[in-house]
Image: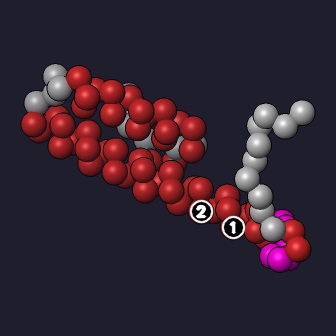
Amino acid sequence: MATKKPENLSFEQALSELSTIVAQMEQGDLSLEQSLKQFERGIALANASSNKLQQAEQKVSILMGNNEKSALTDFDNDME
């Protein structure tokens, strides 16, 4: 199976793969070459995820009309 380019993955897919890479590297069972390859993939995934987050932030800003009165606030999941 071919590996998808990080920019072609959804944010969730990239985050999941990045989590898997971190777990593999933390186990310490990879060779130096494998570790470097996984590190390189992890950096690409992190960069792609960061870009996707920036794009989402821009969309929210546009939808909010860049209105200072409509300032973004932290999401509180515990509100009832």
Considering depth in this image, is 67 or 74 the residue closer to the camera?
A: 74
SS at mark 1 in the image: helix
Provide the residue designation for mark 1: 58
The magenta span reads: 63-68
Spot occupied by residue 3 in the image (x, y as percentages of width and height): 38, 37
Image point 34% across, 51% down: which residue? 43
Question: Of the residues shown, which amino acid type is indicated by label 1?
Answer: Gln
Let me know if residue 3 appears in the view. Answer: yes
SS majority, magenta: loop
Write the residue at 67% across / 58% down. Answer: 56
Task: Look at the image and tell me in which quarter the C terminus lies.
Answer: top right
Residue kind at label 2, given as amino acid type? Gln
Determine which residue is flagged by label 2.
54
The picture quadrant where one finds residue 17 is top left
Asked whether residue 56 is drawn in magenta, I would say: no
C-beta proximity under 8 Å, tags 2 and 1: yes
